[in-house]
Amino acid sequence: ALAAAARMRGAPDATVAPAADYAAGLKALSRVLEWARARVLADVGLPLERYGAIEPRAAGIVDDQLRSSMFLPLAALLDRLAADVEQLRGGGHLLLGLPGAGTGSLRGENAGLAVGPLRVVQGEEQLAGLARGDVVLLHALPPELPPVAGILTVGSAGSLSHVSLLARNLGLPHAAIGGDVAAAAARFAGQPVVLGVSATGRVVFGAASALPAEAGITAAPARPDQPWLAIDAAALDLSTTRVHRLAEISEKDSGVKVGPKAGELGRLFRLFPNRVADGVVIPFGAFVRHVDRPAADGGPSPLAALRQVYAQLSALPPEQAEARALDALAKLRRQIAELPFPDGFAAEVEQGLAGLGKVGSFGVFVRSDTNVEDLKDFTGAGLNLTVPNRVRLDEILSAIREVWASPFSERSFRWRQRILKNPEHVYPSVILHRTVPAELSGVMVTVDLETGAPEALTISTSLGVAGVVDGGAPETVVVHGDGQARLLASYRSPTHKVIPTPPAGGVLRVQSDGREPLLGPDALAELAALAGEVRTLVPSKGGMPWDIEFGLLGGKAMLMQLRPLRLSRAAASQPFLRRLDEKARLPVALVNLAEPVP
């Protein structure tokens, strides 16, 4: 396979190849193991999910199947080839205290460094017990991961899911590992481990006690755990309560009347009228009017009571302060759900929806849009709730309550509190975005995430709606500037979500049909056209890549959201990781592929 790759790259002699091509060929070939694991998981995922509820060890069946197949000797060969490449480099991936585990299956997804206890998660019910300082080992990337210090996923993960985008923004290390590394690491559960990913994807993982002294790592590196982001409270307009049509909203309203998501969607609606669905926007002021009414007993309003609690937190020890804040937030969520809407609010929402069509004949995604997301230095992707495809007015009104409450959830608060100086000024607006019953949906970024090539596109796609941002196992391809596509991962989710025909609301989860690839030449050309329009009409400041959420319906690409791809500049600044990168440079120009592999 490597010789064939060299020949396709135009090498005059198929037995001789540039060292960089040899390393790239091995990297591509190693994805076969991820593909195989994902294929087995797609075939047996549904019964395993049910059986795992009574027997957690069921999660090991997938790796048992692979070890009893031809992929065991293939993995051994890939480890030998990986060792050969690392010898050429003079350094590379580093496993500590994990005998028998090979480096061939390691891949850095996001740069950063963490030291903390290893938590092995077998099911979503274990997520609630995770702490901010944990390094977590997951067999699947959940859509609502609590704050952690580092992330390990077994096999391919959704590198463009909301969790991955949030980790990339905050500088949390994320690495993909093979089943052999996961099995070897399980014995360190509860013990301190180190997880580091360098700027070029070099991975260091293993027992913290096995770190060489010259690494200079004795504790978790400094990260922005201390608040650094302040909300511009003076710019807020909390007096405007009127429900707006999307066409009335512009980027000038971002952080003033509505959140940045609504402001950007208003701009996109005008720039791409045939690619952006219409919608209705409920401003910050409507939320404030709902929760800033005096209590029945004459006490402070729910919002005033929360502000009083925030003012008291600085005088408390950290653990007590967090517990006090979470109690206050839980009370606020209950009050949001129980308070009657202000007079006229429901009628105003209904009138706004009527501008989109006959109420009850279409659905809307009820999307949260706070003033603390999609900012210049913070994305906040997926922290708050989106309630999919509500059709009846009473369901839409109920979903508005849920979305208003979501920025005050425990998970959202814990992710935000590490950066926010004045959390008392967090306000949600709401977008009622007309449903697009997409056949395919996904996320596209205007850069090759592996190489950094700015003319390329990295595209992750799933069947149905919301499959990529929720995690799962999407199809991921890189489309180069010349139109050539490089497959990184095949779609391997056993089920996907589809939109039912109104008046039915919500989403239906159906079994996937096993098709591949999801994106054919026409779909890739359509997405490339969308990316070209975005690059032309919405120039990126400072050359920052765009993060584009899309849906494909009838072959047409619909634009759901657009935001800059935020990268943590400090994530790979640790000297030890920089030294790994320096060692990993390939000084050898050519390699003889006919020579025996050590």
Image: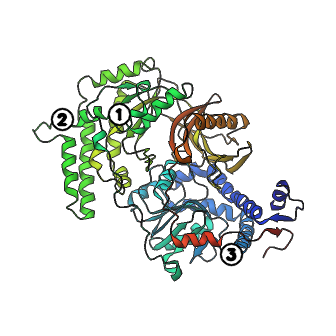
Q: Nearer the viewer, mark 3 or mark 2?
A: 3
- Residues packed near mark 1 inside 10 Å, few (<14), some (14 to 19) or many (20 plus): many
C-alpha distance separating marks 1 and 2: 18 Å
Whichever of callouts 3 and 2 sits on the residue coming sooner in the sequence is: 3
Query: Horizontally, is 347 left or right of 390 in the view?
Result: left
Outermost left residue? 298
Q: Is residue 463 above or below residue 14?
A: above
Determine contact: label 3, label 2, CB under 8 Å. Answer: no
What coloring was used for the rendering?
rainbow
Whichever of callouts 1 and 3 sits on the residue coming sooner in the sequence is: 3
Which residue carries the number 1 mark? 400
Whichever of callouts 1 and 2 sits on the residue coming sooner in the sequence is: 2
Q: Is residue 152 above or below residue 527?
A: below
Q: Nearer the viewer, residue 12 or 37?
A: 12
Q: Which mark is residue 90?
A: 3
Tag 1's secondary structure?
helix
C-alpha distance separating marks 1 and 3: 57 Å
Residue drawn at (71%, 73%), measured in percent from left and top? Answer: 83
Which residue carries the number 2 mark? 293
